[in-house]
Image (tube, rainbow, N blue to C red):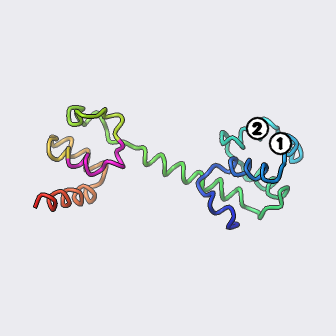
Amino acid sequence: MVSQFEKYKGIHPGIVLDRELKKRFIKQRPFALTIGEHPQSFNAITKGKRGLSTALALKIEKELELPEGTFVFLQAYYEIQKIKDKELKNTPNLNLLRAALFWDTEIQKIDWNRQIKSVIERVYERGNESEKSEINRFYGINKVQKVLNEVDARKL
């Protein structure tokens, strides 16, 4: 992939396309008609609301004289990023954790990935065995053990 587009990995290719068209002072509607695409569909792509097919990406690249595969790669990287983001949003099974453990905050608003240490510490100080088991499942036993070792080291 061309290095000028390397920085756009993980961003919807339609957003990058919209920026490229603006940079070249090309209007969306006439461009869409030039490549045989419906302007409404093309607009949805440039707004990031619709994916970019390989066939359409190749047409766009040819018309804009970009290296073949540029937008195809951007679409692939975007899909990868979507999956990674979805994995990050996973939460432990809240039915297995008592809200009373997190009395000072709303349990639904906890950032489970940013507050790993405090969550693990709190559950291991005040939680029951099923809550500890759920935290072990969610974070993985190695991560939990590492955090608990750090907590023990601080107490010494």
Labels in figure, total: 2
Instruction: Give the CA distance from mark 1 to mark 2.
Output: 7 Å
- Mark 1: amino acid: Glu
Q: Is residue 61 left or right of residue 112?
A: right
Q: State the SS at label 2.
A: helix
Would you identify the image quadrant in which residue 49 lies? top right
Would you identify the image quadrant in which residue 106 lies? top left
Would you identify the image quadrant in which residue 64 lies? bottom right
User: Magenta span has 113?
Assistant: yes
Q: Which residue is mark 1?
A: 37
Q: Is residue 146 left or right of residue 48?
A: left
Q: Are marks 1 and 2 in contact (CB under 8 Å)?
A: yes
Which of the pair 147/134 is nearer the observer? 147
- Mark 2: amino acid: Ser
Rendering coords of residue 70 (x, y %): 72, 60
Rendering coords of residue 146 (x, y %): 24, 60
> Which part of the image, by quadrant, shows the N terminus?
bottom right
Determine if residue 55 is in view.
Answer: no
Q: State the SS at label 1.
A: loop
> Which part of the image, by quadrant, shows the C terminus?
bottom left
User: Magenta span has 34?
Assistant: no
Residue in view at x 70 percent, y 47 percent: 14
Rendering coords of residue 53 (x, y %): 72, 49
Q: Which residues are magenta?
A: 111-121
Relative to 60, residue 42 above or below? above
Q: Which residue is mark 2?
A: 41
Residue in view at x 73 percent, y 50 percent: 19
Rendering coords of residue 153 (x, y %): 15, 62
Q: Is residue 25 left or right of residue 113?
A: right
